[in-house]
Image (cartoon, rainbow, N blue to C red):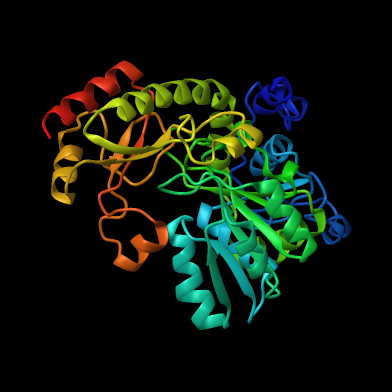
Amino acid sequence: MKEKLLSLTHSGETPEKYFHAVTPPVFLTSLHIYDRFEDYADADILKEDEYIYGRDANPTVSILERKIAELEHGSKALAFSSGMAACTAAIMATCRAGSHIICMKDVYQPVTHFLNCFCVPKLNMTVTYVSGNDLDEVEDAMKQKADLMILESPATFVFRVVDLKQIAKLAHRYEVKTYIDNTCMTPLFQNPLDYGIDIVMHTMSKYIGGHSDIIGGVLVSKDQELMDRIQTQMREWYGGILGPMEGWLAIRGLRTLYARMMQLQDTALKVAEFLEKNEKVVRVYYTGLESHPQRDIILKQQKGHTSLMSLILDATVEQSIKFLDDLKLFGKGCSWGGFESLALMPLYKATEEELTQRETKRQLIRLYCGLEGADNLIEDLEVALKKL
């Protein structure tokens, strides 16, 4: 962890280039000019510290990318204007018309929407959905000449954890690229590239940003050739680069990431343990609890825990909504990762098919524990539970 602390605070920066400022500047520029035309003509955006146009690369964003590449043990990182811009770039870079994609059932919903509503009808792709825990099921899907497997561990809503090392081993055997959303673990608590996963994505509006004031995404890989291709063919041509101001804010977020994550996981564990003991709570989904069904995998590949969790009350949908409304410290919002605690019922409008696929109920409640303090959050939850 001591090396990661240096990556968060100092790595990737060259203060001697900007008057020894302790904080790098925001390069609010759309283009870079040269004294000689020959220098401009020979400039290569794939080389470090060579810049031409803001859609290709930006010096502030490059500092952020160097930090995240080092944190995730990758050779190169690329920042995008959103997590979905990063995700779709990875899919389009590794697949083609007619590709077969394997996807975990309970990944982030907009990802499945992109697959089902764009990739399948527009590009004639096929998608096989798997739980991720049954390795025989995963291998059977890979035998169908798949190009990509999309992972999320812990996964959205029920926080399913899958064995990254074993899945990567199978994927390499069948020449399937693997992609994972590692947002809720951060590079501090899980490094999928070390287990053989090909591409890691983070939504930077969450823990990396940490203050609910930016939208951004980032891809990281050990495959330099793949990342160069994504930079020129996906990010440059699609125009999805992160803005310099957002890049600077993400750098600021990284500086406090360790301190925030240690506090957040401590708070979340106390909240999860309180909820698990309450008679009005049927189930709590949280990776830090000993009751988690994939506890053995968690101990092998995670170094810490998110402050996200889900629960199901001994209550109807309507009563669960009332419980949400009775919470005073938990705002009702869809994102997470900032200082503020949040609560919502993310599957309230889901179809019965979606609920079956995700193996959960409509009244599932997701909580994000922020920085208000465990005692305050538990007191708020206790009051709402007593009103049920």
Q: Which quarter shows the N terminus?
A: top right
Say if 345 sits above or below 256 in the image.
below
Quadrant of the image occupied by residue 177: bottom right
Q: Is residue 245 left or right of residue 100?
A: left
Is 285 or 22 nearer to us in this picture? 285
Position of residue 87 measured from the top left corner of the image (x, y, whole percent):
57, 58
Say if 84 sits above or below 127 in the image.
above
Position of residue 302 measured from the top left corner of the image (x, y, whole percent):
61, 34
Q: Is residue 317 left or right of residue 21?
A: left
Hey, which residue is sitting farthest left in the picture? 387
Position of residue 348 measured from the top left corner of the image (x, y, whole percent):
25, 55
Hey, which residue is sitting farthest top in the picture? 375
Residue drawn 33% across and 29% down? 276
Quadrant of the image occupied by residue 23: top right
Say if 305 sits above or below 197 in the image.
above
Residue drawn 41% across and 62% down? 357
Position of residue 178 measured from the top left corner of the image (x, y, whole percent):
68, 58
Residue drawn 39% across and 21% down? 270
Quadrant of the image occupied by residue 139: bottom right
Residue 78 appears in the rendering: no
Q: Which quarter shows the C terminus?
A: top left
Is 178 or 38 nearer to us in this picture? 178
Residue 75 appears in the rendering: yes
Q: How many numbered circles are shown?
A: 0
Say if 299 sits above or below 228 in the image.
above
